[in-house]
Amino acid sequence: MGKVRVRFAPSPTGPLHLGGVRTALYDYLFAKNQGGDFVLRIEDTDTARYVEGAEEYIEEALEWCGIIPDESPKKGGKFAPYRQSERRDIYDRYTKQILETNYAYLAFDTSEELDAIRAEYESKGEVFSYDNQTRNRLRNSIALSEEEVQRLLDEKTPYVVRFKMPVDRTLNLVDIIRGNSAVNTNTLDDKVLVKNDGMPTYHFANIIDDHEMEITHVIRGEEWLPSLGLHTLLYEAMGWEAPQFAHLSLILKPEGKGKLSKRDGDKFGFPVFPLDFKDPETGTVSKGYRENGYLPDAFINMVALLGWSPANDKEILTLEEMIQEFDLHKVHKAGARFSKEKSEWFNHQYIQLKSDEALLQIVKSSGLNLNIEDEKLLKIIHLMKERATFPKDIYENGKFFFEAPVSYDEKASKKAWNDETSDILKDFAQKLEVTEFNSEALKQQIHDFAEDKGLGMGKVMMPLRLALVGELKGPDVPDILELIGKQESISRINNAINNFS
């Protein structure tokens, strides 16, 4: 096996789910760890479920996540085209090739005929399967004479191409994550390989494209495990070397059984898509992690650990560190339970790791109309980021920096304000008129004022904070005073005095 090549092959039938992001990420990490290539291929043969804008959404989502393909429909590459809808001539060639083997046949059964047979089986309490037990009695090129088949073809009767599953063979299957397993071919049905419109199904197009694009490893979700036997036999039928397979476990819902769905996100209040997605038909917008204020590196770090454990159980890793450590053999077989709280924890950690300057640009681009100079905003970010989970928290938790309080917390008011407080703050406001307005000087002024008046620091500091903030919260009072400025500080103190008087 030559250079490692992996592919992420989503269908443009809607937004990219969290599970799809994880598959793409593991593909990318494995490829880069092995010095290989990561390919994005769009599997758009399912025209009935195609959603306008979904392909562009997938590409934008991967770009935001930092999962950049080496080859893709947008980027091109030596194995182009990278959309299945543009590869029809390639599929036609291989359809002819497999029909020349003993692994495929033509089936002329209509959907109505097959529905009638299913109903007949169900009436007897049985389940119909188009397989080696039934195919000899159905309308196909195995059961019909050559003359009858030719007549049907001459009459342009619609047909599908089915895979002829071998009889009673034991297939020994190998999975990098799950180890070895065995399946008997008698338990597998004769899947459709080419539909009656001439387009291949997922099963056939998938192995053709993987072969043509020299894919060495196929990393995909566990929902494709039941197809591993068929895909292994398809490679055998075509005389090709099969890639190595690795099937990822499910991402589980926060509570109960089953895989994570959009419904769970709606119920528990978190996104399941990387970016906002607007349904082109209904106009409904599904929320994304980007628009909810998640940083891309925090999001990717969180996704990476949904099913994989790096050395020493380290939790905070850069993309480069993930690439260095990633090993498919360390990917878990069991499902990974999603946690909203853990996802927020990751974002909080990355907010803390960002420089104030980097956060300045993020906050400024977050859509908040702050109307404040960068120098002052930078100081606010420095004071507030420790408490922030999302960039918007810097504004929401520090709203008092941008606007005066219009009310005062009742419980805090009872604690901080008494009959003497108004006189104390009137005197203090006069001191502020002649005080140098920087944090250190203001800190000293508060200390000296309390000492001169024979007051405990709480008698000055608590009502002062209440006047400035409206609550007993926020960073150090001298820092708040400095940032909102002399005139605004005095104005807020006077407003509080008037309110409580």
Image: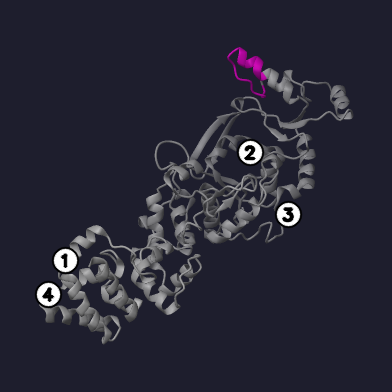
Judge whether residue 9 can be spotted in this image.
yes
SS for callout 3: loop
**Residue 433 left/right relative to 447:** right
Label 4 vs label 2, nearer the camera = 4
At mark 4, the secondary structure is: loop
Mark seen at residue 231: 2
164 above or below 83?
above
Q: Where is residue 266 drawn, in percent x and y? A: 47, 44
Q: Residue at point 84% right, 25% down?
A: 149
Answer few, some or many: residues within 10 Å of disc 2's Cα (few below 14, many 20 plus, some between 14 and 19).
some
Q: Is residue 54 above or below residue 482?
A: above
Please say if 191 is above or below 296.
Answer: above
Mark 4 surroundings: few (<14), some (14-19) or many (≥20) residues within 10 A: few
The residue lying at 66 percent from left, 19 percent from top is 118
Image location of residue 465, percent across then percent down: 25, 69
Please indicate whether residue 192 sits to the left or right of residue 61 in the image: right
Contact (CB < 8 A) between labels 3 and 2? no
Cβ atoms under marks 1 and 2 closer than 8 Å: no
Q: Tell me the distance, in whole angstroms, between the alpha carbons under discs 4 and 2.
A: 82 Å
- Amino acid type, mark 4: Leu
N-terminal label among 1 and 3: 3
